[in-house]
Amino acid sequence: MVNQMRKTTLAVLSFAVLAFPQGLTLTLQPGVFVREPYACNDAPNAAIRVWDGAAFSGAGSTRCTTRVLSRQGEQFRISTTCAALGNGAPDNSGYVEELLLTRKSDSRFIISREGQPEGKYRWCRAKP
């Protein structure tokens, strides 16, 4: 019986390591981040990213999932998928946003996408 429990425990621990690879977590303060140079209280929707502690979302985005695909130091390649985009209507297209996020602190980061200027974001407030 004890031997069987050890095997079960090892199997569970092995699964946890595979499911959550060490070092692939993104630590940011949950809340509303606004792209510079916009003021926190006067930013257009396109300049706002909301981090809930597990996923990014924006205006009209719901049920979002963000995964860390890889990490090199404070640079994270992430992928975000949302069930609804833009006007809040369901989106079954399978749209996925992949980008490179460089974490400067728990309240600042830079987003880079190929062929586009990088965006510097800062924390403005907790999510309403």
Image: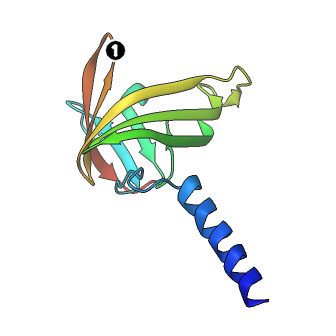
Q: Examine the rendered structure and indicate whether residue 119 appears above or below residue 23.
A: above
Name the residue rendered at 59%, 54% in the picture.
Answer: 19
Residue 11 drawn at (x, y percent):
67, 67
Q: Element type at marker 1?
A: loop
Q: Residue at x 38, y 54 (%)?
A: 23
- Residue at left 36%, top 55%? 27
Which residue, as the protein is rendered here, is positioned at the far right?
Answer: 1
Where is residue 72 drawn, in percent x and y? 29, 40
In the image, residue 56 above or below residue 17: above
**Residue that numbered label 1 is attached to:** 114
To which quarter of the image does residue 83 belong? top right
The reply, left or right, for residue 1 in relation to residue 117 is right
The percent coordinates of residue 107 (x first, y second) are: 26, 51
Q: Is residue 106 left or right of residue 89?
A: left
Quarter holding the N terminus? bottom right
Depth check: give the residue in front, 69 or 114: 69
Q: Amino acid at mark 1?
A: Glu
- The answer to whether one can see residue 59 in this image is no
Is residue 68 something one can see in this rendering?
yes
Specify the farthest residue to the bottom.
2
Front one among 61 and 74: 74
